[in-house]
Amino acid sequence: MNKKVAFYTLGCKLNYSETSTIGRLFNQAGFDTVDFTDTPDVFVINTCSVTDNADKKCKKVVKEALKISPNAYVTIVGCYAQLKPKEIAEIPGVDMVLGAAEKFQIVDHITDLTKKEKALVLNQPVSEANEFVSAFSIGDRTRTFLKVQDGCDYSCTFCTIPLARGASRSDTIASVLLQAEKIAASGVREIVLTGVNLGDFGIINGERANKFFDLVQALDEVVGIDRIRISSIEPNLLTDEIIEFVATSKKFVPHFHIPLQSGSNKILGLMRRRYKRELYVDRVEKIKQVMPDCCIGVDIIVGFPGETREDFIDTYNFLNDLDVSYLHVFTYSERENTLAAEMKGVVPGSTRAERSKMLHILSDKKRRAFYNTQLGKTAEVLFEGDVKEGFMHGFTRNYVKVKTKFDPVLVNELKTIQLTQISPDGDVEITESEEILVH
């Protein structure tokens, strides 16, 4: 009987694509992938370290894993494993810790599944993580996360990602196209492009070989994929040519997620972001000019050191006036070895929480206002295979979330519907006969 392996992923879409790829490596080595609760022989926990909470979650997942399968071999990979390998090695029950340069050789390193008294740590300096390893998620959704870029050369004062993933590096366009063709052949309808700094795509062996726009143009010709979504792109790297191309593309969808982090130029300067808020306004206006129905998501950080009440209100008013569709709100968290952690003007935790709550409420209002603009319009929904309380979900091209009573025939199908009204609980209903809700 084959040995069983289970995975748990914390963090970003990039981590999900890499977990899926590591899973295929285990399958090729004769392991069966099972659910986390199915008493596996090996647990692989892929970690994030963007916030302090992500570190705590890793410890909790290890504890839960050993309740399920006390004798299982526990391996930790990912950003937290690169940044704090010794700390992880001290967690009871952990057997192996692999850094950024070692995680894709995990199967070679697991030669003996006997529990260890002391965890084996294989962790080279992040400068050794200079190879690009392609990855994509598959088998669990109608959407696939395709990794095309890794690492980051930016030096934002709050971020540990360059320390955890190394310098910016990319796949070749030819390789990405091969991966996309494999994904298309598997029956997946939508690809989500992912990377640490996606718009910086094109650096190979330390030299710029291509631009992200070159990749966008090439992917638009891939046969068998209905939709391509850009996961997140820095405002200073989102060019007019990309926006204009997406506006006329049949495959690239009208949805951008653009990190802002603060609406205060003072705070943007302290963060060492590579733009001012005026550029952000320009990017939003350009998008809405050529794609009025485009969905725009925003990353925002509250409670950064030095953020006064006036700075926060400046950010709040800036976002309130901006024609965007939703916010991803992050509460600032001090990270070791970052410049921000040494800055003055620390914002109390209770104040951070209060500001976060205000922006979450604003996000709900923004989403509802965006949905209001879509009422009466016809939209194409791609339904996914999830089931929750008898309902399944899907998304329109411009990222309106739709739910309907579960019907296995709809899984991975594109269905044209009309958005008709918003219900009292905030869902958007289309037609009664369809029994489909948008929320």
Image (spheres, rainbow, N blue to C red):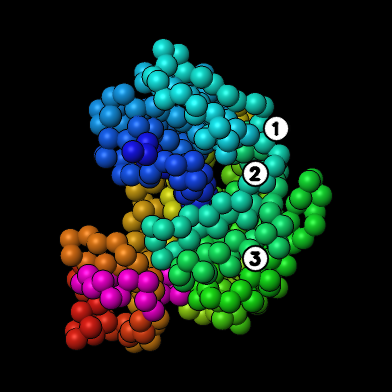
- Residue underneath mark 3: 177
Q: What residue type is labelled 1?
A: Glu
Which amino acid is tagged 2?
Answer: Gly
Task: Specify whether residue 80 is in view.
Answer: no
Look at the numbered disc 1 and give the secondary structure of its residue. Answer: helix
Q: Which of 71 and 290 is in front in this view?
A: 71
Q: In this view, does 241 lie above or below 272?
A: below
Percent across and percent down for residue 47 are 46, 36
Q: In which quarter of the image is residue 167?
A: top right
Q: Where is 129 relative to 210, above or below? A: above
Question: Looking at the image, which residue is at 68% across and 66% down?
Answer: 215
- Determine crowd level at label 3: few under 14, some 14-19, many 20+ residues with C-alpha closer than 10 A: some
Q: Which amino acid does label 3 sit on?
A: Leu
The boundaries of the magenta stretch are 396-414
The furthest residue to the top: 117
Q: Which mark is residue 128?
A: 1
Q: In percent of the image, x 39 and y 61: which residue is there?
A: 141
Q: Which mark is residue 97?
A: none
x and y, in percent, of residue 424 in the image: 19, 71
In this figure, what is the number of numbered marks? 3
For mark 3, give the secondary structure.
Answer: helix
The disc at residue 151 is: 2
> Camera-side residue: 389 or 289?
389
